[in-house]
Image (tube, rainbow, N blue to C red):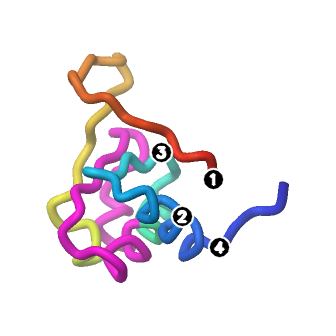
Amino acid sequence: GEPRPLGEVAALALAERPDGILVLANSLDSASLCQQVRKRDARLPLFGSDWGFTQDVVAHGGGAVEGAGPMLTERGDETGFTVPVADI
């Protein structure tokens, strides 16, 4: 399908009233999506992968990524979290 604007993706994800959001994207898209989520919910926990949450996320995401961090590693460590996946 057609790519959706990240603001729309954030709104769709937040409509499900999640306890947190796991972002699986490259660093620039992760930063942009985190910004869109923060515009709508400043306190929701944000998580990502260690390959996507690089220094570029901080450089491009600014305060929107403050407090967000990697949850998944390349080794596939188990975290104990259950993450529902929204159909977006």
Q: Which mark is residue 12?
A: 2
Classify mark 4: helix, strand or loop.
loop
Q: Is residue 67 left or right of residue 52?
A: left
Q: Residue at x 26, y 51 (%)?
A: 19
Q: Residue at x 57, y 70 (%)?
A: 6
Marks 1 and 2 sit apart, C-alpha to C-alpha, by 7 Å
- The mark lying in front, picked from 3 and 2, is 2
The residue to which callout 4 is attached is 5
- Amino acid type, residue under disc 1 in the picture: Ile
Report, in whole angstroms, how far the alpha carbon at label 3 lies from the one at label 4: 16 Å
- Residue at the spot of label 1: 88
Above or below for 71 versus 62: above
* Residue 42 falls left or right of residue 38: left
Q: Quadrant of the N terminus?
A: bottom right
C-alpha gap between disc 1 and disc 3: 13 Å
Question: Residue 47, image x and y in percent?
Answer: 29, 48
Distance, label 3 to label 2, CA atoms, is 16 Å
Left or right: 15 as drawn, with respect to 45: right
